[in-house]
Structures are given as C-alpha cells and as structure tokens.
Image (cartoon, rainbow, N blue to C red):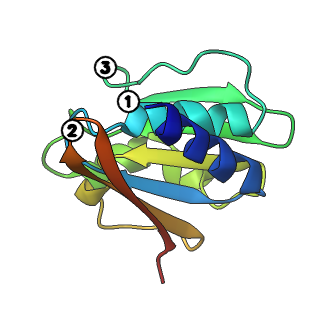
C-alpha cells in the first residue's frame, strides 16, 4: 500500500492539468490508495475519500481542481449519467484533472487520457501499468 501511495504521488506531481486518468482494477486492488497518493502529489492536503455513494468529489489544488469519480454503482447508460453529472463539460479543461474509477463502463472519452491498470498478483503485490490511450 505504501508503494502504491508513493507511485500515486509521483503521478500526481507529473500532472499539468487537463488529464483524465482511467483506473481499472478489481475491488480492493488499491485504486483509492493510488488516488490518495495522486491527490497528495498535486498538493491537496485534505484526506481523499472514495465517492462510491455520491459518484464524484471535487478537491481544490493550487494548479487545478481534482475530480475523483467512482462509476462502480452506475448501471445501464453510464455515459448518459456521466453527461448529467456535467463531467463532459469539465474534462479536458486545463484547470481540471479527472481520476475515474471503474472507467471501463464508459464509451465516450476525452482526448487527453491515460489508463492506469492495477492487477492483483498476491495479497501484498500489485502490478500497476500507466500509459497514454490513443
């Protein structure tokens, strides 16, 4: 968990604004831990809490706003629900960064996007892949 957090912190410090990070990984893989590191890396002092029941939380950083979105509870036309949340109007803007859990439920994507996959190897070992999506 500590290494996952530290990797998130490194990713956070590399963000410039306008990025959308798509996270995938099974329940308990460490997605929230990674996002907590990302939030610290962008300078957010508040403890990040998963938005599973409210779908989206906004955190204000010095360079941009960080939006943490969790699509786990959404079913059916997820793209419609995401549009209704106003996410399409906000992502890609240089003043915002989005981190979206369970993003594999989406069919519509912004232009500046990255995939972060967390694969569980064992109870205390994860393989984390971070790459741009074209």
Using the image, determine if residue 109 lies above or below residue 102: below
Q: Residue at x 60, y 70 (%)?
A: 112
Is residue 39 something that shows in the picture? yes
Using the image, determine if residue 54 lies above or below residue 128: above
Residue corresponding to mark 3: 53
Is residue 68 something that shows in the picture? no
Q: Position of residue 68 (x, y in %)?
A: 51, 36
Mark pair 1, 3: CA separation: 6 Å
Q: Quadrant of residue 116?
A: bottom left
Q: Are marks 1 and 3 in contact (CB under 8 Å)?
A: yes
For the residue pair 105 and 14, the one nearer the viewer reads as 14
Binning the other alpha carbons within 10 Å of mark 3 as few (below 14), some (14 to 19) or many (20 upward) gives few
Q: Are marks 1 and 2 in contact (CB under 8 Å)?
A: yes
Residue corresponding to mark 1: 55
Give the numbered dot on residue 87.
none
Q: Position of residue 39 (x, y in %)?
A: 64, 34
For the residue pair 44 and 127, the one nearer the viewer reads as 127
Q: Position of residue 21 (x, y in %)?
A: 51, 56
Q: Which label's residue is closer to the chain start, 3 or 2?
A: 3
Query: Relative to residue 42, is residue 21 drawn left or right?
Result: left
Residue corresponding to mark 2: 74
């Amino acid at each position: 968990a500590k290494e996952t957090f530290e990797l998130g912190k490194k990713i956070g410090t590399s963000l410039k604004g306008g990025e959308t990070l798509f996270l995938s990984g099974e329940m308990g893989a460490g997605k929230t831990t990674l996002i907590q590191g990302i939030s610290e890396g962008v300078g957010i002092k508040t403890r990040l809490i998963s938005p599973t029941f409210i779908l989206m939380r906004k955190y204000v950083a010095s360079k941009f706003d960080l939006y943490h979105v969790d699509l786990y509870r959404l079913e059916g036309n997820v793209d419609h629900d995401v549009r209704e949340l106003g996410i399409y109007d906000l992502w890609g803007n240089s003043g915002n960064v989005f981190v979206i859990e369970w993003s594999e439920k989406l069919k519509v994507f912004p232009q500046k996007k990255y995939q972060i996959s967390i694969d569980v190897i064992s109870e205390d070992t994860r393989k984390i892949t971070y790459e741009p999506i074209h």
